[in-house]
């Protein structure tokens, strides 16, 4: 089974700050793609906390590992919906599990890490963000809300380990203290950073994956009352009911191949249940001084009619553009029942083209998953900053200096919303004057401002939903083309070097291996009496300006890079695979790959090449090259003339040549990847430099 292995905190910190200093990037996201703030106020409140933008990554692949959360933050995400955790933390997830060929499908569940690992990843992420802030990144745009996500039933959520998880994020003092000590010496000046220890006090309850609808109220009450958290209940698109879901998907949008299993509607909450518990929970939350809201929506369960996922998967979860339509219909319906009494957060097909509209509806936070997995002029996390840039443009176009004023002005409903309030004549006149003259609406409306915003939210919801229903961008016809494949096949080296696989990986597992162009001799040593004879069996030609490597610990074989790679064979299955530890490498005997062990000043490199295990280490001026049936010392500049040692037959030197080449590239002082960061961190801890130069001269 493929397992994610968290990157140690010291290695993450080393890589982050080295990459910022040396490459103007962080975890492969160029600084030019960061969201670095604007003079327009994009801040909002989530329950009682301030968030500098209403955008954030949705619970999913972008919020599981610490580096992903940091990337989401750098892209402008300020409300981070953490990957859902549940008591069953030993799930076996089918692979691949993410299919973004057209719209979005996945067969993921909750977290792949243990509860304890998840807690630590979230604290690591919060600390790295605090370190970035302390180093001057996003000075006026730093307010960030970490929102836990939990599932799926009352017994699991009340279990001791789940309570410990939540308590750990509510008060992370002990973990912060432990991790603070792991900040490497080159970053010692950041050890005094005033790290947040109350990482989160809000939670989103996922009602997916068999969450019993009759338990939702009791779970939310437990989270409010016993855990003392603000609570959002994330609802599912089945809430619309079979007739409307089918009509929208099949008739209006043309996704006739998408079918929802009948049982999905029977098992999920109904409007009667939702309207019942929402009112009760609102009152309960108020009595505890906590916030309560709902979120639309989670993914939609559909039959698996494709052959992307393993055949065992009879069902899959729909996200992306068609879900946008269903989720927005839920927003409208909810507001028709409850008005603007409860905060509504949103996820469902948000992209650069509709993010500002969701803001105009007063939805918050607005979170994204599928679009951040897509490739294009902006790929992966880089798409996040576009949402905010477009929002600022829309705000400027209507003369709105903050989000609430944008809500009032966005769709031209300011006057109608005002009229619906029946304000005293003088107040209404002041508001109208402020509108015409472009003055501050807060000042003009005074106490009535919040109700004006509320009225506009409701009117905007109606207008937007009508417009959206007529918008062809959500239809099957406009979302039917998968990324192009060229018909060529990936090999260990050489490919189109388009680099598409790097930004679309949510975990930043793919990276550039700076191997220069050249020829690699494939050679073997043949015993020749007491000496050796060299036989050349051809050359490997490296004819691309760089190569691609994969960091196994961060790769869960989700499949997303394969979807966007123009070649066949999947980067994560074809390209040189580096493990973060010898243990992880040894635990994956089915995969060719490499691991570097640091021994004082030198490196011992383990490899599995075509299934054969070998190792290479420097021993004085020579290399020790070992494998099954041989143990040689040799100078790679003249193997036949210098080899000494034992062998029970000819020795293939190709693995040695490959390993030497990639070792130099992956550990080079200016290389940016998790291996080079681990080497640098080791060197800093040891107070000595690790050998990263070529072994032969
Ligand atoms: C690969 C993947 C994994 C997801 N994992 C979770 C999860 O763990 N918990 C959850 O509540 N939602 C999960 N979701 C749903 C998203 O949080 C989001 O609600 C949904 O995908 C709709 O947003 P989108 O259209 O922007 O993707 C996942 C979605 C995807 C695509
Ligand atoms: S390298 Fe590819 S398969 Fe692996 S996690 Fe990243 S996107 Fe998924
Ligand atoms: S592996 Fe595929 S996506 Fe990655 S650089 Fe090569 S051709 Fe491009």
Image: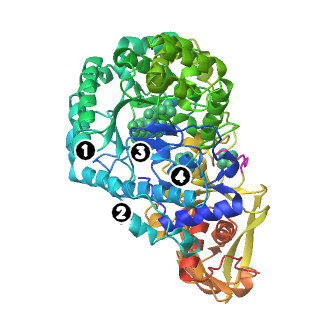
The CA distance from mark 1 to mark 2 is 23 Å
Pointer 1 with pointer 3, Cβ within 8 A = no
Pointer 1 with pointer 4, Cβ within 8 A = no
Considering only vertical position in the picture, is 476 above or below 296? above
Q: Nearer the N terminus, badge 2 or badge 3?
A: 3
Q: Nearer the N terminus, badge 4 or badge 3?
A: 4
Give the residue at mark 4. Answer: 70
State which mark lies toward you, 4 or 3.
4
The CA distance from mark 1 to mark 4 is 27 Å
- Range of the magenta residues? 495-502
Q: Nearer the N terminus, badge 4 or badge 2?
A: 4
Q: Nearer the viewer, residue 442 or 634?
A: 442
Considering only vertical position in the picture, is 34 above or below 528? above
The CA distance from mark 1 to mark 3 is 15 Å
State which mark lies toward you, 4 or 2.
2
Whole-percent x, y for residue 622 in the image: 67, 86
Q: Secondary structure at mark 3?
A: loop
Q: Locate residue 69 relative to residue 242 in the image: left or right.
A: right
């Amino acid at each position: 089974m493929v397992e994610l292995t968290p990157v140690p905190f010291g290695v993450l910190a080393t890589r982050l700050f080295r990459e910022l200093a040396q490459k103007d990037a962080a975890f492969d996201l160029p600084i030019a793609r960061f969201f670095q703030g604007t003079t327009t106020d994009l801040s909002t409140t989530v329950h009682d906390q301030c968030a500098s933008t209403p955008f954030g990554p949705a619970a999913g692949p972008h919020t599981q590992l610490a580096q992903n959360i940091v990337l989401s933050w750098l892209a402008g995400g300020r409300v981070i919906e953490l990957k859902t955790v549940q008591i069953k933390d030993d799930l076996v997830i089918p692979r691949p599990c993410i299919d973004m060929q057209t719209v979005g499908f996945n067969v993921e569940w909750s977290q792949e890490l243990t509860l304890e690992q998840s807690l630590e990843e979230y604290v690591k992420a919060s600390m790295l963000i605090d370190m970035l802030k302390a180093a001057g990144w996003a000075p006026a745009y730093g307010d960030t809300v970490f929102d836990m996500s939990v599932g799926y039933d009352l017994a699991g959520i009340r279990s001791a380990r789940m309570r410990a998880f939540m308590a750990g994020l509510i008060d992370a003092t002990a973990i912060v203290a432990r991790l603070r000590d792991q900040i490497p010496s080159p970053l010692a000046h950041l050890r005094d950073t005033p790290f947040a220890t109350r990482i989160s006090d809000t939670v989103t309850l996922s009602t997916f994956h068999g969450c019993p609808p009759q338990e939702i109220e009791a779970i939310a009450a437990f989270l409010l009352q016993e855990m003392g958290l603000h609570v959002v209940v994330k609802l599912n698109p089945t809430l619309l009911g079979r007739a409307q879901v089918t009509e929208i998907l099949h008739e209006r949008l043309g996704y006739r191949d998408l079918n929802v299993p009948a049982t999905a509607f029977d098992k999920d909450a109904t409007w009667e249940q939702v309207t019942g518990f929402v009112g009760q929970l609102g009152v309960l939350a108020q009595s505890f001084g906590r916030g309560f809201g709902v979120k639309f929506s989670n993914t939609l369960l559909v039959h698996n009619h494709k052959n992307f996922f393993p055949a065992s998967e009879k069902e899959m979860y729909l996200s992306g553009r068609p879900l946008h339509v269903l989720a927005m219909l839920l927003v409208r319906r909810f507001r028709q029942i409850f008005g603007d009494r409860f905060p509504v957060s949103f996820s469902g097909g948000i992209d650069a083209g509709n993010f500002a509209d969701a803001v105009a509806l007063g939805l918050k936070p607005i979170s994204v998953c599928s679009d951040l997995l897509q490739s294009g002029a902006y790929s992966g996390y880089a798409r996040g900053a576009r949402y905010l840039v477009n929002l600022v443009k829309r705000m400027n176009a209507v003369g709105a200096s903050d989000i609430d004023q944008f809500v009032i002005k966005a769709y031209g409903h300011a006057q109608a919303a005002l009229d619906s309030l029946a304000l005293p004549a003088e107040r209404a006149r002041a508001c109208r004057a402020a509108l015409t003259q472009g003055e501050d609406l807060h000042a003009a409306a005074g106490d009535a401002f919040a109700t004006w915003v509320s009225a506009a939210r409701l009117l905007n919801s109606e207008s937007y939903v009508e417009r959206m229903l007529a918008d062809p961008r959500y239809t099957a016809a406009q979302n039917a083309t998968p990324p192009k494949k060229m018909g060529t096949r990936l090999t260990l080296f050489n490919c189109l070097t388009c680099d598409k696989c790097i930004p679309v990986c949510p975990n930043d597992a793919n990276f550039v291996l700076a191997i220069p162009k050249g020829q690699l001799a494939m050679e073997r040593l043949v015993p020749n009496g007491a000496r050796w004879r060299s036989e050349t069996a051809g050359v490997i030609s490296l004819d691309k300006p760089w190569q691609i490597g994969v960091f196994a610990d961060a790769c869960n074989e989700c499949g997303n890079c394969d979807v966007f790679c123009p070649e066949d064979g999947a980067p994560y299955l074809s390209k040189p695979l580096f493990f973060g530890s010898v243990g992880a490498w040894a635990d994956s005997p089915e995969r060719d790959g490499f691991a570097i062990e640091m021994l004082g000043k030198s490196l011992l490199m383990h490899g599995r090449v075509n299934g054969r295990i070998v190792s290479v280490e420097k021993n004085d001026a020579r290399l020790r090259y070992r494998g099954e049936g041989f143990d040689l010392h040799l100078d790679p500049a003249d193997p036949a003339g210098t080899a000494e040692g034992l062998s029970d037959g000819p020795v293939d030197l190709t693995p040695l040549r490959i390993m030497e080449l990639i070792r130099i590239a992956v550990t080079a002082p200016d290389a940016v990847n998790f291996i080079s960061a681990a080497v640098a961190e080791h060197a800093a801890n040891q107070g000595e430099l690790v050998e990263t130069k070529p072994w032969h001269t």
